Amino acid sequence: MSEDKTKINILGNTKHREIKKNKFRILDITKNTENTQYVKRLQEIKTSLDKALDKAKFGYKLNTFYASTMPLDTKSYNILYINPKNALEELKNCDKINLYNIKLSEKTKAIALTNIAYYDNTNKTLPLGMDLSDKILMDMSKQKLELKKQKLFRINQEIDEMEAKTKIICVYEYEAIYVEG
């Protein structure tokens, strides 16, 4: 007997029979893949992403967030979050965090990582939306960022009854303007 891989899952209060995507199959890599093949495959994927982003029309004004301990990288792709709490979650153990609030316009070219990014939709049962993630992929090199505000927060975090730690969060508010070409 063959294994039934189309078990019913629930996503966004909707049942579906889709299979999670395999990142190794998408990348077309195995344990025997040579470095040159891997680099070539990554370049092909970057070219595909560039084409997809050129065609993408986000169509919404939206506040997005990016958290880092380093200055904002404006020369490459970045994953931005819709929820600032999710952006900060990855850096919860850091004492100093830069939180970038990037306001996107309707003309911004970005790709929302919706449910279809994580599941194959061969059975056509996948619910539309962003139930798994609130991430957005954007090529920062195609954006002109204008700094609008800058604030500094200090947050006390209680470790136990006798010990507390202070976190510093520097918030930078930018407005993103898409640059053609």
Image: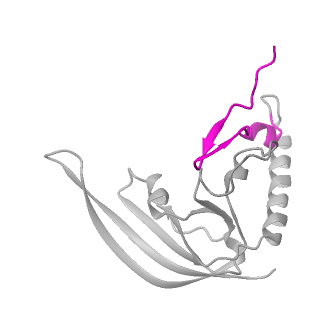
Q: Return the x and y of residue 117 as percentages of the image width and height.
A: 72, 51
Task: Indicate whether residue 20 is drawn in magenta.
Answer: yes
Note whether residue 91 is visible.
yes
The residue nearer to you, when weighing 25 against 97, is 25
Give residue 16's quadrant in the image: top right
The residue nearer to you, when weighing 73 against 24, is 24
Note whether residue 35 is visible.
no
Name, please, the residue furthest toward the left.
162
**Principal SS element in the magenta part?**
loop
The residue nearer to you, when weighing 119 against 41, is 119
Q: Quarter of the image containing the C terminus?
A: bottom right
Give residue 178's quadrant in the image: bottom right
The residue nearer to you, when weighing 83 against 94, is 83
Q: Quarter of the image containing the N terminus?
A: top right
User: Which residues are drawn in magenta?
Assistant: 1-29
Residue 82 higher or lower than 23, as above or below = below
Q: Residue at x 14, y 45 (%)?
A: 161
Task: Indicate whether residue 125 is drawn in magenta.
Answer: no
Q: Residue at x 79, y 47 (%)?
A: 124
Q: Residue at x 86, y 41 (%)?
A: 37
